[in-house]
Amino acid sequence: MFEQPQTAGAETVLYQEHIRLTDKSHIVDFAGFLMPLWYSSISTEHTAVRQKAGIFDCTHMGVLEIAGADAADFLDLITTNDINSLAAGCAQYSYILDAAGNVLDDIIVYRRSADKFMMVVNAANTPKIKAYLEALKNNRIVIDPDNPGRKLKYKSVIRDMKISDSKADCRVDIALQGPAATDIIFSLIENNRIREEIKNLKPFHFIEADLTVIPAKAGIYGDIDCIISRTGYTGAKIGFELFVHPVKAPQLWNILLEKGSPLGLVPCGLGARDSLRIEAGLPLYGHELAGQFNISPFEAGYGWAVKLEKEFFIGKTAMQHRVKTYDMKVAQIELRGEKGIRPVRQNDGVLNKNGECIGWTLSCANAGEKQVALVYVNKESAKENDPVGVYYLARSQIQIQQGKLQSVRKGQNLQPCITGTVVNRFAKF
Amino acid sequence: MIAEGLLYTKDHEWAKIEGSTATVGITDYAQQLMGELTYVELPAIGKEFRVHDEMAVVESSKSASDVYSPVTGKVVEVNSNLESKPELINDDCYGSGWICKLAITDANSVENLMNAKQYEEYLKGL
């Protein structure tokens, strides 16, 4: 596996806004960045996104540009999805694998023009992906185990769009998610044609336009040039990611909050981001992808983003094997979750109706009075509406003394501590 | 927020000593760190604890923490309201969010606890 270089904790460009909006004790080191777990509370912020809107600091996410006459061919080779089917103004979910088929990251590729792409990568994986792409370009890695001499000959330029060398077109990500998101953006757009374009923007489509602060005040930017994309990580039917220059990011954040507050907009932290994406069935790298179980896109439920019919991409041989042999899957279950119910956690045992352990919990969160968990279970089990049980692992000395287990194996017979139901993943809210 | 008149541990429990009874709970600092609590596992009445024994478990959607006994004693009463309303600890950690009452069996066990001023200084150093 390609190793992850270590990073030190850093403030995001919105750090000053965060410490104005919430107590410092709510700020944690996440993927090397100091970010709020919540501002008011996870449940308030979760509900706001489902009913009105939420704004998220995603400026920690990595933003890379791949540009040049052969950029599309280069990307087609290093990602699993089909770049040639991606039109300008569209975005695509995809994976970067190593030659052994390990998932190095899940990404979104934005095609800005025929030969210019923007790639958004997970914050925690950014140093690894940058190092990997450089190593690939310099032919320092075997890309094809069936043909170890296979070399890359690409001239594409890879650029980190977050660092100041990128000058005016530097970009960081702020997400605006929820049913009120369109109206909130409209408060910064006077031009009817652009409003119409944003209103008609389909999921995974984007435009590049200026947001205008009206009325212009001294010391602020009148126009904020943005990539406005119908993408997100919350399962919201309406949601945008706004890619903006880091210098302008605090102003955009503040003006969106100012204009959006009357419409119910609230700032949302990492906690709500996690509970929303879990409720929407979306994978998190390290949990529902890669991680302790080395989960591939097939187990994760995203085999459609791995185009085995392509002539070649890095990791293809391993994926051709995996598609025939995988026997686990990510599923979603619902359980009671009102106050007083003990929360389900990672690695808790998942049981079928006979009490047989069929897998483990990957992630769990509260959504209203429910708990929603993403679980890793036998592929042929856990069909929609099936009853399931969960066995809570011991998480304290008291529970260990009471004889609670600290780990469980598949096939083990256990008494469920709480019962629930398998539900359909990928609901839209 | 620190309440006057209570005694404190380095693990962010508080104890209110009245005669030979200690009412105990977790501090505002601790509940802030945990976030919205969703579950509290209370000790059994009659159970005996020494100072720093694990006494209860508090869980939020993000984490689970042991609560340690601030004194040596025997559980005489538990706040069973917390079973259905763990948020009482978030809302009123020094009042209706108390966890249990202990009959102190070793008076010396109280002596190492911090007063409000000492706890305040301790928090500044974290």
Image (cartoon, rainbow, N blue to C red):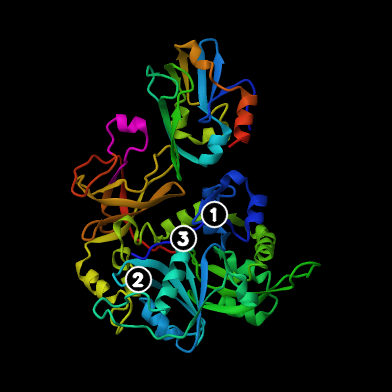
Mark 2 residue crowding within 10 angstroms, few (<14) / some (14–19) / many (20+)? many
Q: Amino acid at mark 1?
A: Gly
Q: CA distance from mark 2 to mark 3?
A: 16 Å
Name the mark nearer the viewer: 3 or 1.
1
Residue A314 tag number: none
Q: Amino acid at mark 2?
A: Leu
Q: Which residue is mark 3?
A: A124
Which element is circle 3 on? helix
Q: Which residue is mark 2?
A: A97
Q: Is residue A397 magenta?
A: yes
The answer to whether residue B100 is above or below residue A257 is above
Q: Is residue B65 magenta?
A: no
Q: Residue at x 49, y 64 (%)?
A: A236
In the rendered structure, the answer to whether residue A256 lies left or right of residue B97 reads right
Q: Earlier in the sequence, mark 2 or mark 1?
A: 1
In the rendered structure, the answer to whether residue A310 lies left or right of residue A56 reads left
Q: Residue at x 33, y 74 (%)?
A: A304
Residue A9 tag number: 1
Magenta region, residue range: A389-405
